[in-house]
Amino acid sequence: METSSKVIVIGGSWGGIQASVTILKALPANYSIPIVLVLHRLRNHDGNLQDVFKHKIALKAVEVEEKEMLQPGHVYLAPSNYHVLLEKDHTFSLDDSELENYSRPSIDVTFTSAADVFAHNTIGILLSGASKDGSSGLKYIFEKQGKTIAQDPNEAEIKIMPLAAIESIPGCTVMNLEQIQAFLLSLHDH
Amino acid sequence: MKLENEARFEQDVEELIKEIHTQYGYDFNGYARASVYRRIKRFLSHKHLTSMEALRKELFLDSYFFENFLQEITVNVTEMFRDPSFFLSLRENVLPILSTYPFIKIWDAGCSTGEELFSLAILLKEEGLLERTKIYATDINQKVLKQAKAGIFSAANMPAYTSGYYAAGGRQEFSSYYSSNYGSVKFDSSLVKNVIIYPHNLATDFSFNEFHLILCRNVLIYFNRELQERVFKLFDESMVSLGYLALGKKETLAMSEISSNYNFVDKNNRIYRKIN
């Protein structure tokens, strides 16, 4: 099975769906790096996030299944009411333990776990959101020498989330959505 | 805690798992590691322990501390009517069939602190089945088992549990099932008079009875494939013909050898029925 040495983890809450669609629609169907997307959602709500992405992006949007292997060309969506973790063998684990930052799925949990497995090959992106979830996970990625990006707060629908990251990580790169698109395309291995 | 070296930490965890097995008899070898690492780091930070060595010392000196550790490592987060659509489906698709039996046996595997157990008992009562049902509620963790049958939960959770109850097809005044006292509520103990509480470790223990319905929700996500397969076989051996198996919303029989013995009753809510 094809596997990638890198991973892109993206987090967001309020305004995060629209921002992530904007980024992801720029990427080709065979994009070489697997993407994990953690968006805060209503608890016990089955509203199908997959459908939101389905016709808007070329990548395959799927909800995370436990033990599934990370693969290129896919966007993995964190399911409602579970934390998403990554294992050494690049498979997913799910976890229904305590909320973190009032959230499950929590962006911090996935970012931290991704950095434990992929270390400097982790690319973490924090988008618009009305929560501080994600900034300590992004900081952890930074400490593991991964790439950390916060959406430009001036552009974000709600700036609390990217601002929290910028404040806690001095080396965090700030980009608008267009720049994030271009950066991700530059990582694509044809 | 600053972990200088993740690889070293992971090695230490493997050693610890072996030692725990030898000293205390609990086998965590089949547990999915990402969650184990996270739980251990969390526990270290809560207990203000700065190294794995310090944790080892405490664990093997003090069995009470170990109990505490066990409770943290095995996730015991639960709620009443978690996934109300599951309970509604149980009420509409499973209980009517179970009602044709003169006597019903249910296994609630990994019952934790009892929220699921009481949700189930309320459903059985409302469907007129409680009197002829025996529920075996098991967990690896003896400490949570003590709470499971008490039915004492935080009053702060009641608004959420009440809406879960109605979404699960509840028809009564939910507060008629409990009495409130100092920020806690206590559920009617007659709900669990036919419940047998029993320590059982899915990783190492064997089948102990035959059931018409087995519930094991959000337990298998913490296990690796091998251990999941062990548990599926254990459930299959413990299931009457045409019995039901209920898993968590993100758990599946699909990869198991026993899957060909089962059909979906409700795919979305992961309710299966044994067909042969």
Image (cartoon, rainbow, N blue to C red):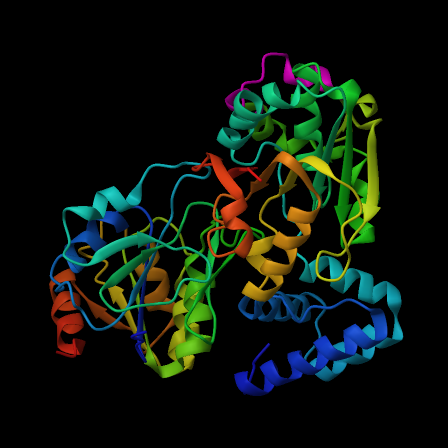
- Number of numbered discs present? 0
Query: At x 80% / y 47%, what residue is drawn?
Result: B208
Query: At x 64% / y 12%, what residue is drawn?
Result: B173
Residue B51 visible in this rendered orientation of the protein: no
Q: Is residue A53 magenta?
A: no
| Relative to A172, residue A164 above or below | above
Frontmost residue, A128 versus B133: B133
Q: Position of residue B174 (x, y in %)?
A: 64, 18
Left or right: B123, with B132 as reference point? left
Q: Residue furthest front?
A: B276
Q: Is residue B173 magenta?
A: yes
Q: Position of residue B69 (x, y in %)?
A: 75, 64
Quadrant holding the N terminus of chain B: bottom right
Frontmost residue, A59 versus B174: A59
Residue A164, by quadrant, is bottom left
Left or right: A84, with B76 as reference point? left
Range covered by the magenta-colored residues: B164-178
Query: At x 63% / y 34%, what residue is drawn?
Result: B243
Q: Position of residue A68 (x, y in %)?
A: 41, 62
Q: Position of residue A104 (x, y in %)?
A: 47, 50
Residue B211, by quadrant, is top right
Residue A75 visible in this rendered orientation of the protein: yes
Quadrant holding the C terminus of chain B: top right
Query: At x 59% / y 81%, what residue is drawn?
Result: B10
| Relative to B77, residue A185 above or below | below
Residue A59, by quadrant, is bottom left
